[in-house]
Image (spheres, rainbow, N blue to C red):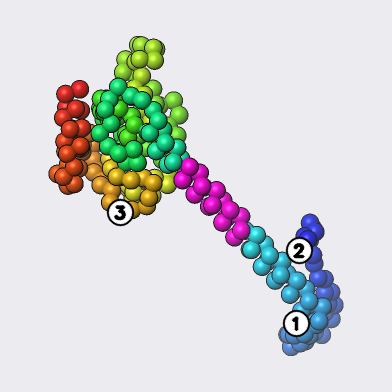
Amino acid sequence: MRFINGVISVSLIVWLTPQANAQDVEKIAKDIGKSPHYERAKQFAERIEEELNRRVRQKVAEKKATIDALYGRMLSETVESGRTESNDHDALFGAESRIFIFVSRSVPLDTLKAYAAGIESLGKENLCFVFRYFPSNFLGSFLRKDPDCMADDCVVKAKIIISDRLFQRYAVTQVPAVVFDPDTTHTNNNWLLVYGAVPLKEALTLFYEESGQHEFKIAANRVAHN
């Protein structure tokens, strides 16, 4: 269907004499409603509205598909980078597993710096910071180990993900929160979640107590001795 920009109007001009009463006006209105021109105009307007609604639904579906595709690619790239990147630390977890640290600008800097130090001691293959929105001019405030040092070695090499969808996927409603997902390549409910500004060592210890995976105990001890 081709649309023509403009306004389609149906003009019905009625001259009411001073003698016209309410019944006359009502009769005229009923006659207008029975007019074939009125009915055709009404049907045309309904078709336009239906077509516009269809196009809006189509655009929404296309946008959602695009977002879902980007989200899937983001997770795939994160997993792939974990497979290919080298680090000084031995990998404790599988390539598809992730520990997500959900934070925001509202989290105290000391807490963020402690998490960053934990990531540095464990390696960034499996650990990521997750923000709902991009924290402009903020990352350096907690990733830089020494505010007076501008060298690359003075910055924690942490992965940063900006994703509202990850907040939704793991039902994170407050920050900070630490999530362990054993396999990010599949949607499952096997992930573990800890709320509150708990040290990373404590979160890993809770994961160990809940899952019995010995890797969490090793990781917790590594963080503690950093």
Q: Which label's residue is closer to the chain start, 1 or 2?
A: 2
- Left or right placement of residue 83 versus residue 119 in this view: right
- Residue 186: image x %, image y %? 37, 50
Is residue 216 on the magenta stretch? no
Q: Secondary structure at mark 1?
A: helix
Q: In the displayed structure, would residue 220 be above or below residue 211?
A: above
Residue 1 is tagged as 2
Q: Which label's residue is closer to the chain start, 3 or 1?
A: 1
Q: Residue placed at 64% from the left, 63% from the top? A: 54
Q: Which label's residue is closer to the chain start, 3 or 2?
A: 2
Alpha carbon separation for disc pair 3 and 1: 58 Å
Q: Are marks 1 and 2 in contact (CB under 8 Å)?
A: no
The part of the chain drawn in magenta is 57-73
- Left or right placement of residue 167 versus residue 108 in this view: right
Residue wearing tag 3: 189
Q: Are marks 3 and 1 in contact (CB under 8 Å)?
A: no
Viewer-proximal residue among 204 and 52: 204
